[in-house]
Amino acid sequence: MIIGAALPPRDQAREKFERLKIKLRAHGFVFGKTIRREGAVLLRPRGGEYISAGKDGIALIGEAGGWISPSSAEGLSYALKSALLLAQALRPGIEGFEVRYGGEVRSLRRNLSLKNLKSRFLFHPLFRKAVMASGFRSLQVQVQ
């Protein structure tokens, strides 16, 4: 099992991670020996100026272009989506692909802008505390 958490590095991250594992154990999760521990700086775009499709004949996809969800820090789906959009922009040929790709990624930009608004609520301490106190944690989904 891989356990991950996005925690501020200077704010007792290790202690908070240990508390997370204690809570998970209380819910029945059983952990074996730790094989590896890693940490990385998590960058989230704060606005459209942090996202780039590229320029001067260079196209950027995925995290290289800042295509990362500001609310979840997830980037794989944006890497795949931006790669597909670049492929579509290149289909007619190299000439003019930058303009086509820039147009293709407009929907991704809108999506990330909305997620940026959402993340401001998700990561605001008072709002987050109120949500956690509400008991609302998950939804059960029935698959038919």
Image (spheres, rainbow, N blue to C red):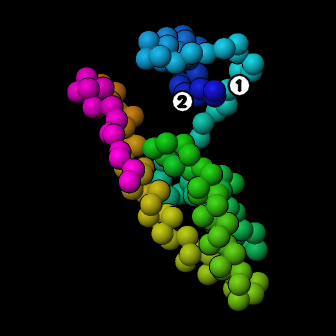
**Residue 120 among those drawn in magenta:** no
Q: Amino acid at mark 2?
A: Ala
The answer to whether residue 14 is above or below residue 62 is: above
Residue closest to the eye, 121 or 83: 83
Q: Residue at x 65, y 79 (%)?
A: 88
Instruction: Bin the neighbour count of mark 2 within 10 Å (Cα to Cα): few under 14, some 14-19, many 20 and up.
Output: few
The answer to whether residue 63 is above or below residue 44 is: below
Instruction: Examine the image and state in which quarter residue 92 appears.
Output: bottom right
- Specify the label residue 87 is tagged with: none
Element under label 2?
A: loop
**Residue 142 among those drawn in magenta:** yes
Q: Residue at x 76, y 74 (%)?
A: 57
- Which quarter of the rendered picture does the N terminus lie within? top right
Measured from the top left, where is residue 115 in percent x and y? 42, 51
Instruction: Examine the image and state in which quarter residue 60 appears.
Output: bottom right
Label 1, on which residue? 38
What stretch of residues is rendered in magenta? 130-144
Measured from the top left, where is residue 127 in percent x and y? 28, 32
Element under label 1?
A: loop
Please identify the dominant SS of the magenta region: loop
- Which quarter of the rendered picture does the C terminus lie within? bottom left
Dot placed on the residue nearer the N-terminal end, 1 or 2: 2
Question: Which residue appears farthest toward the front when viewing the image?
Answer: 144
Label 2, on which residue? 6
Residue closest to the eye, 47 or 76: 76
Instruction: Bin the neighbour count of mark 1 within 10 Å (Cα to Cα): few under 14, some 14-19, many 20 and up.
Output: few
The answer to whether residue 116 is above or below residue 28 is: below
Measured from the top left, where is residue 135 in percent x and y? 26, 26
Please indicate, yes or no, whether residue 134 appears anywhere in the rendered image.
Answer: yes
